[in-house]
Amino acid sequence: MTNEDHGRIRARLRDGVVTVKVLLRHPMETGTRKESPVSEPVPRHFIREVVCERNGTPVLTLEWGWGIAANPYLSFDLNEGQVGDRIAVHWVDNKGETGRLEGAVI
């Protein structure tokens, strides 16, 4: 799979701070939405853990629940870093499915 299958990632160094912006492609179903008024609810399907790494070292771990919107956007700053550092974001959802995005600091 390519990055595009799971979303997009961008990491930019400016004034000594690396700003990472991530768009995760995931349906994030709450378990309350119905396809029609008479149908059963769409089963819950949500990202439960997100881990962000710089050069293979975790810098941020998030535990999410079913209340996050579809295709969540995440942005964070790292106080240290340099051009060329590898930034990776990987996630696992409540069904055991995983995704991974990688990029280099520019």
Image (spheres, rainbow, N blue to C red):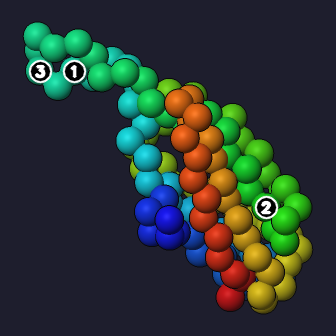
Q: Position of residue 78 (x, y in %)?
A: 80, 67
Q: Residues within 10 Å of mark 2 (few under 14, many from 20)?
A: some
Farthest residue to the front: give it: 1
Q: Position of residue 65 (x, y in %)?
A: 57, 28
Image marks 3 and 1: residues in contact by CB distance under 8 Å: yes
Checking the image for residue 34, the label placed there is: 1
Image marks 2 and 3: residues in contact by CB distance under 8 Å: no
Residue drawn 58% across the image and 46% down it:
98
Q: Secondary structure at mark 3?
A: loop
Q: Can the viewer see residue 29?
A: yes
Q: CA distance from mark 2 to mark 1?
A: 36 Å
Amino acid on which the number 1 mark rests in the picture: Lys
Q: Position of residue 10 (x, y in %)?
A: 59, 75
- Label 2 vs 1, first from the N-terminus: 1
Q: Which residue is mark 2?
A: 53
Q: Secondary structure at mark 2?
A: strand
Image marks 2 and 1: residues in contact by CB distance under 8 Å: no
Compared to 21, does 26 lie above or below? above
| 16 and 43: which is toward the camera | 43
| Residue 66 shown left or right of residue 54 in the figure | left
Q: Position of residue 1 (x, y in %)?
A: 50, 65
Q: Which residue is mark 3?
A: 36
Checking the image for residue 91, the label placed there is: none
Compared to 82, does 94 lie above or below? above
Amino acid on which the number 2 mark rests in the picture: Glu
Quadrant location, the C terminus:
bottom right
Looking at the rendering, which quadrant does residue 9 occupy?
Answer: bottom right
Residue drawn 84% across the image and 56% down it:
58
Q: Residues within 10 Å of mark 3 (few under 14, many from 20)?
A: few
Q: Residues within 10 Å of mark 1 (few under 14, many from 20)?
A: few
